[in-house]
Amino acid sequence: MQTLSYLHQNTDIVQNFQLQDDISTIFNSVFKVELATCPKVINEVFKVRYQVYCIDRPFEDPNCFLDKREHDAYDPRSAHALIRHQITGDSVAAVRLVMAGDNPEQNHFPMEGPCVPHMDERAQRAIAGARREQIAEISRMAVSREFRRRLNEEKSVSGISKAAYYSDAENGKRAMPYISLGLFAAILRMSVKHNITHWMAVMEPAQLRLLKRFGVEFDHVGPVLDYHGRRRPAFTEAASLIERMKASRPDVWELVTDNGQYLPAIPDTNYKCNKIQVA
């Protein structure tokens, strides 16, 4: 396994690197986005989740997953993806998109009951006004403990700190560990594949701030709630978020969209309201 040397610099230096370096080139030289379209890769996703949610953090009981693969009832109607380390082939991070199922019993999302009712009326109207089959919940964003350890970032949920980057011993290039951006690129690719136009999520406030810094800014963000820790619910229309990203952070837009290859569908503006209202 190649050695990744972790470097600490102050915020000003990192910001200068942001201006000088091609984020897409750096990311793609170290990682790759891989959609989980076969049982073997989906099992890798579940193994990453087991390590993060059952071992690293007591989110789920490991005794419930004797095969060391964390999974739940939402996975059959979800799309899954991995971030893989190019040199070693190791699974670095995983994420899923939970989508509405084919029957009314599968139309709810994990965060919907506990979180959405606490959002303001405007946010609830926006959720109710989107086509149910085109909404997906961003869920189970997980970064492996081993990779965080190499970056000395075990206390960071996203595996990223704003003042952290590392060198690849093979080619000596600086590679900023913007794993959250890679996960967001995976989210966008899955969304394009499944015609998703709206995203909902519940995230730590620090992770939302980090994403906002990179131009990933949700339209609606709710209050801090006690939902498996301190979390904030969020909802957005994907195409407008990506368009704002292009204006504010074109470098990140290039990475996330693969230079415009993946762009979310525009929602039907004539669609009035879901039959299923938000509680």
Image (tube, rainbow, N blue to C red):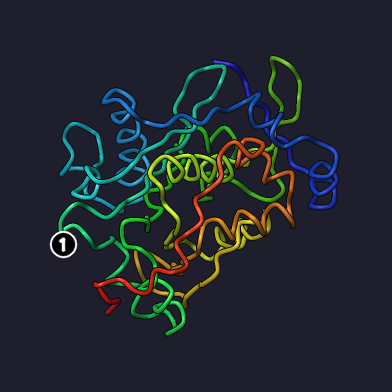
The local secondary structure at tag 1 comes to: helix
Above/below status of 41 relative to 184: above
Residue neighbourhood size for the residue with mark 1, other residues' Cα within 10 Å, grouped as few (<14), some (14–19), many (≥20): few
Q: Residue furthest bottom?
A: 121
- The answer to whether 164 is drawn above or below residue 125 in the figure is above
Q: Residue at x 18, y 39 (%)?
A: 65
| On-image quarter of the C terminus | bottom left
Q: Position of residue 35 (x, y in %)?
A: 42, 32
Give the x, y percent position of residue 123: 45, 77
Residue at 74% of width from left, 41% of height from top? 8
In the picture, residue 268 is in which quadrant?
Answer: bottom left
Q: Is residue 93 left or right of residue 262?
A: left
> Where is the N terminus found, in terms of image quarters?
top right
Question: Where is mark 1, residue-wise?
Answer: 104
Q: Is residue 9 left or right of residue 158?
A: right
Q: Nearer the viewer, residue 194 or 230?
A: 194
Is residue 172 or residue 270 the one in the foreground?
270
Q: Residue at 56% of width from left, 20% of height from top?
A: 86
Tell me residue 105's x, y (percent).
14, 60
Which amino acid is tagged 1?
Pro
Residue furthest front as drawn: 270
Does residue 76 sit above or below 83 in this rendering? Answer: below
Q: x%, y% of residue 41?
A: 34, 26
Q: What residue is shown at x 54% (from left), y 27% (from top)?
A: 32
With 227 as the anchor, is 174 left or right in this view?
Answer: right
Q: How many marks?
A: 1
